[in-house]
Amino acid sequence: MRIVKEKRATFAQTPVEAARRPAGRTRLTNLFLAGDWTDTGLPATLEGSVRSGHTAAGYICDRHQMLDSKDRFDAPSNKTVT
């Protein structure tokens, strides 16, 4: 077994660097960010990356549900009224 340590594997967890981490939501309605480098409330670790992915997936599901409900109420009906 071999253990490898990489000093540059994560960025410095200083307050300045932490403030620069982007949120999972962006200004674009169909673009979400995920990764250990995003603002998850955790350090840049595997756990932070997993939390970020779950959060982004939640945003996508929320957006999909909004689009589905909009289509349901705004789309013209294909049914013929007799």
Image (cartoon, rainbow, N blue to C red):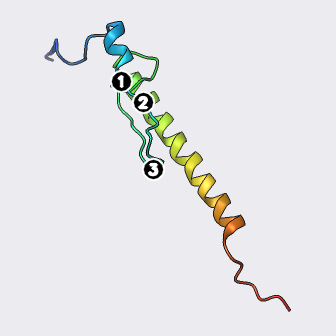
Q: Nearer the viewer, mark 3 or mark 1?
A: 3
Q: Which residue is mark 3?
A: 30
Instruction: Confirm or deny contact between disc 3 and disc 1 (CB under 8 A).
Output: no
Give me the residue at 46% from left, 36% from top: 25
The residue type indicated by label 3 comes to: Asn
Tag of residue 46: 1
Looking at numbered disc 1 in the image, what kind of residue is underneath it?
Answer: Leu
Q: Position of residue 33 (x, y in %)?
A: 39, 37
Secondary element under disc 3, as helix, strand or loop, is loop
In the figure, 68 relative to 59: above or below? below
Query: Against 30, is 59 above or below?
Result: above
Which residue is depicted at the point 25% across and 17% down? 10
Lower position in the chain sequence, tag 2 or tag 3: 3
- Callout 3 crowding tier (Cα within 10 Å): few <14, some 14–19, many ≥20: few
Image quarter of residue 6: top left
The furthest residue to the right? 82
Q: Earlier in the sequence, mark 3 or mark 1?
A: 3
Name the residue tied to disc 2.
Answer: 50
Q: Are marks 1 and 2 in contact (CB under 8 Å)?
A: yes
| Residue 53 position by quadrant | top left
The kind of residue tagged 2 is Val
Q: Residue furthest front?
A: 27
List x then y, in percent, for residue 34.
39, 35
Residue at 14 percent of width and 16 percent of height: 4
Determine whether, in the image, residue 11 is placed left or right of residue 58: left
Numbered tag placed on residue 63 in the rendering: none
Residue at horizontal 82 percent and vertical 88 percent from the top: 81
Pick the residue in front: 37 or 27.
Answer: 27
SS at mark 1 in the image: helix
